[in-house]
Amino acid sequence: MRIYIVHPGAHHKNVESIRKMMAANDVQYTECNDLSQIDDSYTLALCNLFFPPSAFPKNCKVLYGPQFFVFPDDPNHPIHQYSYESGRFFYNSLSPWVKTIHEQFAPKLSLKFVTCPFGLDIDSIRQVPPPNQRSKVMIYFKHRNPDQCNSVIRFLLSKNIEYELIQYGYYRDEEFKNKLQNTTFVIWVGSHESQGFAFQETLASNVPILLWDVRSMHDEYSNGWVYRSYTQPLIATTANVWSPECGIKFFEENQLESAFNEMNSKIEKFNPRSVIESRVSLKTAFHNILSQLN
């Protein structure tokens, strides 16, 4: 198998993951900014840029995306100008809820939507010490109403609980990962995620999450006005990988205290790293891509 990769402008975490997935699975690949080097020897192309179907060799499957668009509802986007051979052309929606929304917005598009999250290099992510050797609670805040974050802070202060606040866009990766080493669990107040690398990296470090989850893209605060202009429910989640081993979810502010108490009572029982390893390790994620394209 040889894979051709075109990813200018892709999220750096996506690029890093693609390279590591190729290495972990002993796959030959070529990275390029265009299709100038593609030929019949390639069996799969991963394209973060759009090229018309006719630009690819006849025996090459094509996985477009992710994130050409939030919603594929712009009829002027070039992706709508072509028909796509069944079983050969796909679009990566990353997660099931995004796939559902894409299919709702573009039911006539012959391009098939699939869910191919990128793999995590589990071995490079440090595991934290046992819970009894970690002392702080972390709040991770991203694109939600500030009142919700403030309500969590007030709650922790009322309990005299020491906390760290990490706000999306205002921290460095290494700082975040270092602070996780002394974090008993994270109270996650985030918005919808198509993959959620920081979320999944937290679980991979074996830190469980108390998740104030969302029900819809409408719950986003910073760009919420854009999503609220659509009448569709836009059902979404923060957690695209989740099981009871990862932590506890809640949706309403009045559930915070009971969820927090339950989290404390079960802290020794969570094992989120095992969930990440079984679902989005470098080898598992790559084999998921291949299976989705068959």
Image (cartoon, helix red, strand yellow):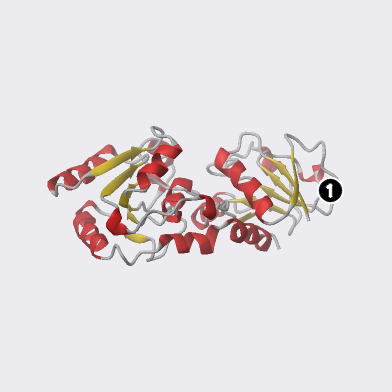
- Residue 52, position as x, y percentages in the image: 75, 41
Q: Where is the N terminus found, in terms of image quarters?
A: bottom right
Q: How many marks?
A: 1
**Residue beneath the point at 62% across and 40% down:** 75
Residue farthest toward the right in the current orientation of the protein? 40
Quadrant of residue 50 in the image?
A: top right
Query: Residue reaching furthest top?
Result: 170
User: What residue is at 26 percent from the left and 48 percent from the top?
Assistant: 136
Q: Position of residue 160 (x, y in %)?
A: 14, 47
222, above or below 247, in the image = above
Would you say 130 lies left or right of 106 here?
A: left
Asked whether, in this view, residue 256 is left or right of residue 38, the answer is: left
Q: Nearer the viewer, residue 275 or 7?
A: 275
Q: Mark 1 = which residue?
A: 57
| Nearer the observer, 155 or 122 | 122
Q: Residue at x 47, y 48 (%)?
A: 196
Q: Please state which of residues 178 and 166 is positioned toward the viewer in this rendering.
A: 178
- The quarter of the picture where residue 115 lies is bottom right
- Kindly state the secondary structure of the residue where label 1 is placed: loop
Q: Is residue 37 left or right of residue 267?
A: right
Task: Give coordinates of residue 53: x percent, y percent.
Answer: 77, 45
Q: Position of residue 190 (x, y in %)?
A: 36, 45
User: Can residue 12 be seen in this snapshot?
Assistant: yes
Which is nearer the eye, 140 or 101?
A: 140
- Residue 219 visible? The answer is no
Q: Amino acid at mark 1?
A: Pro
Residue at coordinates 31% horizontally, 58% vertically from top-left? 131
